[in-house]
Each structure stands twice: as C-alpha cells, then as structure tokens.
Amino acid sequence: MEMTGEQLIPVPQAEVWRALNDPEVLKACIPGCETIEKVSDNEYRILITAAVGPVKAKFTGKLVLSDLNPPNSYSLSFEGSGGAAGFGKGGAQVSLKAEGAATRLTYSAKASVGGKLAQVGSRLIDGVARKMADDFFTAFNEKLAGPAAAGAAAPATGKRRVHPAWWVAGALLFVFLVYLALQPAH
C-alpha cells in the first residue's frame, strides 16, 4: 500500500513542528489513542483502542524517527500488532514548508499488512483513509488554530488522502490498520 498527499495547515511552520512533537496534542487528535509514550529521543510506543460495531480491540505499536531536519522534514518507521487481527509495518517521509502564515505538509508513505488486515479490499481502504485523514486534520487544525480554522483548512490532495504528519503518519496509519483488522473478511 502506497500513499502520498499534502495538507495546508493554517499556522506557522515552527508551531506545526512543535505540535507534531507534542504527544499530548497528538493523543488528542488521533482517534482511539490511549497513550503515546516516549521511549527515547527518537522512539515512541503507542496504545490504541479501536471499536467497530460490537468489536473492540487494543493494538500496540512502535514508531521510530530518523533523518530529522527540524522544522523541515523527517522519516519514520512504524510497526504495530493487534494479535490475531493482524499486523502492519512501513515507513513515511514528511516535509513541512512555510506558505505565508500557513504550513504545507507533504508526505509519502508505504505500508504492508498481514493477517486479517491483508484481506480487505482497496475501495474500503480508500474510503476509510479519506475519513481518517479528514478527522485527524479537523482535530489537529482545531487544536492549533481554533474551531474556525478547522472548518477552513484546505483539503488534502494526492493519490490517497491519508494521515500525514511525522510520527503521526505512523500513528494514524496504525489506527487505520486497526480499523481494517476489525472488518469482516470478504
């Protein structure tokens, strides 16, 4: 699975970078996120509870940052497991660029899945990815710039609109993989 896209965030680049490095901001914006724990300067552990209909499961994951170039770019790798539901792993490259008083966030991510996760169709993946991207950016923009900015944020663009933001890219992909794991097999 490959994903690329971009998002215009209505706050300055330094503020976006700071928020993307704040586990509390990210925890508030990632659906189902229970904890984001800093293990080292470049490694985080995440715990997410996902519920789809009557099914509820906990998933654990690890995010590792590399090639940090504050406040311009970074790379990340991620892996997560939900036991019998399956697993996901991959990587992403993210860049931030000032556009006036706003920031353009651009990303490219690759992921692979196994277990039940590998049995889901691409149409479902695209629809869920768009919804998750919209939900994340609404919450992220509101957290940074207030409720008015969340509604006025520019839509994501690219092959697939997915959760871009440095280790947030990994965390949101992880949330997305959790959602897919809980879908019935086709």
Image (cartoon, grey):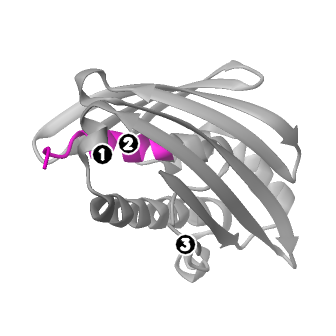
Please report the residue visible at 40 percent of the width from the left and 37 percent of the height from the top: 113
- The percent coordinates of residue 38 (x first, y second) are 65, 22
Amino acid type indicated by mark 2 = Leu
Please report the residue visible at 65 percent of the width from the left and 45 percent of the height from the top: 92
Q: Which residue is mark 1?
A: 179
Which of the two discs, 3 and 2, labels the residue nearer the N terminus? Answer: 3
Residue 58, by quadrant, is: top left
Residue 147, disc: 3
- The percent coordinates of residue 50 (x first, y second) are 29, 39
Whether residue 180 appears in magenta in the rendering, the answer is: yes
Residue 21 is left or right of residue 168, and the answer is right
Q: Main secondary structure of the magenta part?
A: helix
SS state under label 1:
helix
Q: Give the Cα distance between marks 1 and 3.
A: 27 Å
- Relative to 142, is 77 above or below? above
Q: Which residue is mark 2?
A: 177
Residue 69, by quadrant, is: top right
- Point out the frontmost of discs 1 and 3: 1
Which of the two discs, 1 and 3, labels the residue nearer the N terminus? Answer: 3
Amino acid type indicated by mark 1 = Tyr
Q: Residues within 10 Å of mark 1 (few under 14, many from 20)?
A: many
- Relative to 116, is 155 above or below? below
